[in-house]
Image (spheres, rainbow, N blue to C red):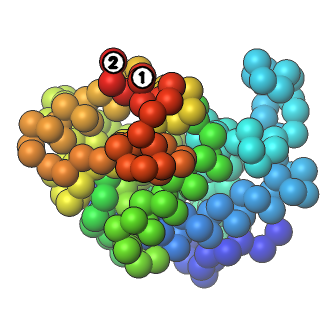
Amino acid sequence: MPVPWCNERRCTLIPDVAERGLRVRQLWDLCIFLRRLCKTKSLRRAGYAKDCGYDQWLEWQALNLYDITDEVIKKYIPYHDQKWGVDESDPIIQKRYSWAELVSAEPQRPQLMISHWWGGRFSDFMTTVDTVVSDRALSICTSLWVCTFANNQFGESFGSEIIGTPFVRAIESAEATILIVDRDAGSLTRSWCCLELHCTILREKELQLYTSTGMVGSAAVSSGPLVDAISR
């Protein structure tokens, strides 16, 4: 299956994790690829999951970032390396790299830091991103920092102190933090999301909360269970 991104290089190693943003266009490219995989029944969730049982085909509306990490990122990158004929016995090669380093030609300092829960639907995640892009009049070249794609999912060093983690440095680098509140409000219970909120407020950075229907506090999201959960 053809991929909707440049496939003419192995990767671009970007040492500073905080500069591994993804452009809006690159997120759209990934979205196109994932839709194709789901439509052609080429994406299967290995193991057991409560919502679909054992070893079931993944539907676009059920896909989450755990699935994308396990079934796409961790499988496509080794396949891509194999295509380039890399030595799999080399310990440096075995460390691999992030999705951002796979699809980007250079470091991309983020304009926005996206805080989210991996268990939320990726379709909702992308709907939210599209709304943020529209609300803020961003271009397709705007860089967003998303931990799933910025961190090396084969093993990333977060350092010895919280202050030095990629999450905190991405907040410091970005203009604003966008917290995506998924339909189960899972992001409100995750320790990393709480840390990102704390660091954003501590550094007096702009903070906006979004659901898949719009920005919290706007006419589109002024009441309901998610707003109640946020208020608590």
When the figure is inspected, residue 89 is found, relative to residue 173, above or below; the finding is above
Badge 2 vs badge 1, beta-carbon distance below 8 Å: yes
> Label 1: few (<14), some or many (≥20) within 10 Å?
few
Residue that badge 1 annotates: 229
SS assignment at label 2: loop
* As drawn, 7 above or below 79: below
Viewer-nearest residue: 151 or 170: 170
Q: Inspect the image, locate mark 2, and give the three-letter code of the amino acid beneath it.
A: Arg
> With 164 as the anchor, is 32 left or right in this view?
right
The quadrant holding residue 15 is: bottom left
Q: In what element is the residue under mark 1?
A: helix
* Relative depth, front residue between 119 and 43: 119
Residue under numbered circle 2: 232
Is residue 210 toward the left or the right of residue 34 in the image? Answer: left
Q: Residue at x 90, y 50 (%)?
A: 41
Q: How far is mark 2 from mark 1, CA to CA?
A: 5 Å
| Residue at the farthest right position | 40
Quarter of the figure that contains the C terminus: top left
Question: If the image is split into quadrants, where does the N terminus sit?
Answer: bottom right
Amino acid type at image mark 1: Ala
